[in-house]
Each structure stands twice: as C-alpha cells, then as structure tokens.
Amino acid sequence: MKKGSALGLILLLLSVITVLAGCGQDKGTTTESANSEVKSELIYASAKDINDMNPHLYTGSMPAQGMVYESLVENTVDGIKPLLAESWDIAEDGKTYTFHLRQGVKFHDGEPFNAEAVKQNIDAVQANAEKHAWIKLSTKIVSTKVLDEYTFELVLSDPYYPALVELSMTRPYVFISPKDFTNGGTKDGVSGYDGTGPYKLTGHKIDQNATFEANKDYWGGTPEIQKITSKVLPAGETTLLALQKGEINFVFTDDRGADSIDVEAMNQLADSGDFQVVRSEAMNTTMIVANSSKVDNPVHETAVREAIWVAIDRETISNDIFNGTQTAADTLFSTNVNYAHVELKKREYNPENAKELLEKAGWTLTNGKAVRTKNGQSLALTLYYDSNSSSQKTQAELIQHALKDLGIQLEIVGEESTSIANRRATGEYDLLFNQTWGLAYDPQSTISAFTSDSAYKHTTSGIAQADELYKKIDEVMVSTDEASRQSLYADIMKLVHDEAVFIPITNGRVTVVAPKNLDGISFKQTQYELPFEQMKFK
C-alpha cells in the first residue's frame, strides 16, 4: 500500500467518515441496506471544490492531492521511511542527499518515474521560488542532478536537518508527469494531473464533484476501495441529512480544519449502533493568531493580547463545544511535539486578571461606556473565522461575549477558508483562527512560517524582539548539534509565548465515524491526508 503505518493525523476540528449507500439509490435506503450494497466506493462531502490540483501550487484540496501524488519519502510515527525513494545517503557535511529510486513506478499517463522526472519536478518547484519561500528547504537547494536512471542527487547550500521532513509533505515536493508541464514547468499551470499515487482523478465538475478511481497499476497494489467521489456540500445540517439519506458516504475535515458536522451529530450517528468511532491522538493546536504588526491597532500591544488569552475559557470550549474530543491547550505546541518540553508561564483563565492587565496598560472604562479607550482610541478588534466551520463560529461567539464583559468590542466575521488564508498572508486582520501544522511537521514548519510573508510574518514582526526571533529561527534550522537545537527552540517558543501572538485554544484530533464493516481506518503523520488506500469493507 501507499504510505505505511501512520498514526496521529491531527486536524483542527472533527472529521467524519460515514459510508451509507451507493450512487443512485433511493433516498429512503437504510444504512443496513446501503452497507450490504456498497463494497468498493466512498463518497465524501467537502465544503469546497478540489480546485486546481497542480501539486506545486497551493489552491488544491490537500486530501485530494494526497490520493494522486507521492513524495520521495514519508513521515511516519516511526520517523522518515522510504516511499518513491527506496533509500538515501546523506554526505558527512549534511549538504548532499543521494536518493535511490524505486524502479518500475509509472505515472498515471504511463510515463516512467525516474531520476529525470524527479529533477524536472524539483526544478519546476524551484523555478517558482517566491511562491515557496515559506518552506525553508526551497531556499537551501543549490543543485539537482541525475546520476543514473534511478539515482538522484540533491545539493543544499547549508546543512538543514528538516530536509527529509519537508520532502515528505503533501506539497510542493511531490511528482507529476512531466508530460503535464506547461512551458517546461508547472508555475504557469499544468495540462493534466497525473501522479504516481493509488488513485487517479477521472472526473471533475467545478463546485459539484470530483471522481477518483483506483490506480490498477499502483506499485503498492491496487486499492480495494475502487472509487472515491468528492461532493461539494455546505457544512452542517445539509451534510448530516445527506449522510442520513445515503447521498454521501464520507465526510472529513478539510485542510484548514473546517468541520462538516458538529459533535452532537457525530454522536447521534455513533449512538445508532451502526457505526464505529475511531480517534487519533491529539497533536495539533487550534489558535487565535494576533497581528502584532498593526501598530495603529490595539492588537499591537502585548497587554491586550495577553488579556484576551486569559479571558478565554478553554475548558468550556473543550467540554461544551467539543464534548471532550479536543482538549484545552496552554501552549502553542502540545507536549508530544518534538522540542516542546519547554517551561513556559501558564496563563490560567482569569477574567479579573485580564481587566487588571488592561487597566495597567492604560485601557480604561469611563463615563459608563461599554468599551475601553486609551488616548481617544476604542479597544475594538475584529476576529475572522472559517464560515464552513460551525464550531469556529460557536467559539467566536463565546469569545466575543467574554471580551464584551472586559470592555473589549469584538466583531466576528465568517469568511471562506481561502479568504482567511489570504488575510493571514496580506496582514489584513486583527485576529483570526488558525492551527499549527501538526505533529509530523512541528515545531519546524510552524516556526519556519514565523518568518514567511505568506504565513505568520505579520503575526511576529511587530514584537520587540522580532530580529532576535528571526535570527534564532535561522540558526536552529541549520544546527547540526542536538543540544543547540533544543536550546534554540526553547528560546523561540518562550519569545512568542511571552508576547502572546499565538493564543492557543485547544489541541485537536481527528474523530472518524464509520460503518462497522469498514476496516483499515488509520491516520497519517499529517493532518492533511487520510490513507484511503488502506481502507476496505469486511
């Protein structure tokens, strides 16, 4: 099968897999009859279209791309393992990687996968360097070389310990048939979507559905689930009704953490007795990202950000909104993330402490006003949440109410996930919901994004010690000494924690609800994919 045993895919909000019926069945078909009829097809609901599946750009659905494309190596619970590369050697100086490729692999269009294809793909990614600047590996690659048909050499400018981790990510260092290239590359688009993965994209109706069929020539063996369909549906009641009627048969959290049905609906399905519930361990963090670079806005002040932090009742969010499926988070990274065992001051839920912080910072309530002011400026902020996530909306409303009691005016605005991502990149926000990359990529990927204009540069650039922070990030990524890395990561985590620019809410995990006859449900070391190819009906 495609990518070996994996544990701990962590998504921000809940994912639900529910196989109920086959295509074309009557709406009244029962779950029992659906399970007996459908043995090889999954139909899942997605809040958004799969979009452009070019694996070297960022608009496509990552779960969909994960079915079609593969990387040289994969990140597993046991560390980096072979995938399209069967083995690799790293030079003593840490700069040269030699990959020995799996032989006999073909792209979906029949083209051979070999060292030349690897070189063409990585060169295509590097030709669009500005787009990929958020990933540090893209800034380290000096040369690519074909040594022979199945041996490929990658040379870096400096030692970079996360290199293999970043080569294992869902994008951009995955492989598409060179025949699909446009103008000799991929930055201007592609003419097809032929990867080496266990599924082929065989149909796509924009904003309606996309169809993936099993790759019968897959090097890891033909998947038992023969067909997977992604159907665009709004989250919430519409998706739940579609599940109950058998119109869809698979729902999971999208790549930015928008949940399709809430916990109560998930439990309703589980309590019926027809379904199994499978959960991954908690490994990512849902957070509110604060824009410290907005110098004319209250969010620029550490005291305001810290007051918001202690005003949020995480236990209530965990228990009442997530029914315990997500746990309250006190720090940016959960303790099972590498290098995250760092002693940081704990900010307990304490509204009175929040008021004291604001008072000391000069934000006062006068003349019976409901909103605090300072030097004629009102303490008014805007929080953006994903409109496809019912739980984000509920959290936003709870936080809005809590801050109102403190004299903070909080406007909450729901937008599409792509709009939220754009705001994060452009800095057009005060506060917004986001999440860490997850266990497989952290802390290095989230922390690397602190310096990226397209990610968290606006979040971090306004703090007093921004230059020191960026210097330490550069140092930790090239460090070859384990003790030095631990020390640098501790300093980095303490800096952003003390400045309260990333306000943690909960540690999330994936919850899967599926029919009892669906076997092989597992999780990967990435929150952006599910191992569909390992699933089968008993």
Image: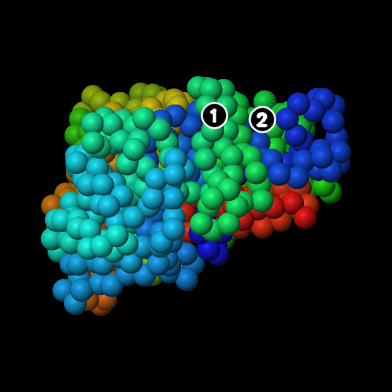
The three-letter amino acid code for the residue at tag 1 is Gly
Q: Residues within 10 Å of mark 1 (few under 14, many from 20)?
A: few
Judge by depth and name the residue closer to the eye, 37 or 325: 37
Looking at the picture, how far across and down is residue 41, in whole percent?
Answer: 69, 40
Q: Quadrant of the C terminus?
A: bottom right
In the rendered image, the vertical position of residue 84 relative to residue 430, given as above or below: below
Residue 389 is at least partly visible in this image: no
In the displayed structure image, the side of residue 145 where residue 113 appears, left or right: right
Judge by depth and name the residue closer to the eye, 269 or 84: 84
The residue identified by callout 2 is 239
In the rendered image, the vertical position of residue 254 relative to residue 80, given as above or below: above
Judge by depth and name the residue closer to the eye, 231 or 112: 112
Q: Residue at 52% x, 40% y: name it.
A: 200
Q: CA distance from mark 1 to mark 2?
A: 22 Å
Q: Quadrant of residue 145?
A: bottom left
Looking at the picture, how far across and down is residue 387, in whole percent?
Answer: 50, 28
In the displayed structure image, the side of residue 437 where residue 3 appears, left or right: right
